[in-house]
Amino acid sequence: MIRTTTLSWLAGALLLLPVLTATAVSTALPMVPLARSAWRLEGGKGAWVARGADGPLLSVRGTGEDVTTWSASVPALTPGHLYRLSFDARVMPGSSVSTVTAGPVGVNRDFSVTEQAAAYSYVFQEPAGRPKELRLGQWHLRGEVLFSHVRLTPVAPLYEGNGADSLGEGETVRNGEYRFRSPLMGEGANSSHPLQSFTAGFNSDRWLIGLGDEVIYRFSAAGGARSGASVAANVGYYERGACEVAVSRDGVIWSVLGRLAQSGTITLPVPDALLPAPAIWVRVKGSATPESSAAVSLQVNSLSFRSGARSANVSESGSTAFVEIERQTPGLGFSLTALAARGASGGRAVQGVARGGAGANGNVRLELALVRKNEPTQVSRAVISLTPAGTRFTLPYLSPGSGLTRYQLKAMRADGSLLYAASATRYLSSYEVGATGHAVARLPQGDLWWCIATAKVAPTQPAPGPARAGAAA
């Protein structure tokens, strides 16, 4: 099963239709303006400066023991939606390289920045009940940091396993067992496929838990939760209170499994009385202890879940790509369903569905470009006919090898006018890069082929293409 992602364009603003709830809600988000009127300084020293051809730059200065923050109001930020924060930054000569801080209220990621200007980026899920503001600044940095090209872009997650299940980053199915480990250090920060809701704060790679703060995950992949299910929570920083771990079959009635009132890891079995279940909710929550006087201060660095899976003969690893829509014509609906679906002869393919509407029917040209560092750009093209019922499309490409790959998809009319443009970056693992080696022969028992002894060959990897002369030598 593939989970689809749909975004729309209207009146010059990006609209996000999230897959976080059953009913999609569109929300316009204009570009965050990098102008003096948009930002205010909150503590510490900062200024607007002009350095050569760079134009206006946002500056923060630190003594090594203080905090400086610039804030910009962003009313269109919508709780539960995902956004990519991008900016360029550099420190002035003689400055320390850390710590630079960036994110909305309630979510932050720390960065180390060098004297060489560079681009920085991550994706976050907007929290509920917080001021809708974006913040840039420094924490205990000595010297000066310069920010420019600040940008907030709505994105939608595309969860893509390499098998029948829709799996995101941190999810695997192997040897009859489903496993999840929260990818808090990844590009998606506080977001993940099983994440249901949260009230806790987030910093860089950990949840910040106070009294009553909670994080809830829902696990339903790979056939739901089965026998032998267990939960593990790791508390890195601990000051007071307890981390309470609870589970539920419906997200309403909870069974507390245990509490951890110190740093370390607690691993707890899910009661057999709750299993099997189509889904299991897991909650970590800050709770008081007799010693804490109703105060809680701790940080959860990871949450893990494991259970029996639907099939013992499946080996899958999940991935998450964040799709950015650069252009979508009103009346035209595009849903990307896969960036690395299995194609012919060991290749891969981008797949999706396009739906026409008023003023957006007829034939359109699709163009896919695969961009990789230090490699020629690979281009795949196709022509499809748009209908209101929807047209499935497949754009095959040759697996370019493991590593980061930038996908750029466009849809154009016959005259070249742009109807749709989207992009995403995905890491292709060594198991996904296609056929390794060379075909030798096709036998009744199956394909015979060879590869070098050190090659990684996935159990699901197809054989290479047609046999070459001398391949068996």
Image: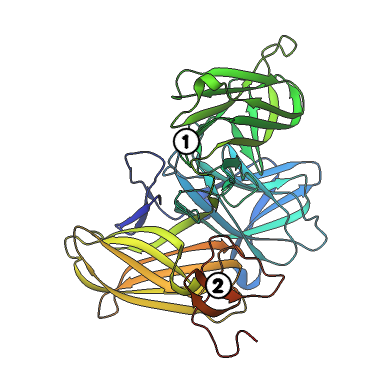
Q: Is residue 215 visible?
A: yes
Q: Which mark is residue 435?
A: 2
Circle nearer the N terminus (2, 1): 1
Chosen colour scheme: rainbow
Relative to 244, residue 321 above or below: below
Q: Could you classify mark 1 by the number of other residues whose Cα lies within 10 Å: few (under 14), some (14-19), or many (20 or more)?
A: some
Per the image, the residue denoted by label 1 is 224
Nearer-the-camera pick, 299 or 174: 174
Name the image quarter holding the C terminus: bottom right
Nearer-the-camera pick, 409 or 211: 409
Q: Is residue 317 visible?
A: no
Q: Residue at x 73, y 54 (%)?
A: 112
Relative to 448, residue 322 above or below: above
Nearer-the-camera pick, 298 or 307: 307
Which amino acid is tagged 2?
A: Ala
Which amino acid is tagged 1?
A: Gly
Q: Quadrant of residue 396?
A: bottom left
Q: Residue at x 50, y 25 (%)?
A: 275
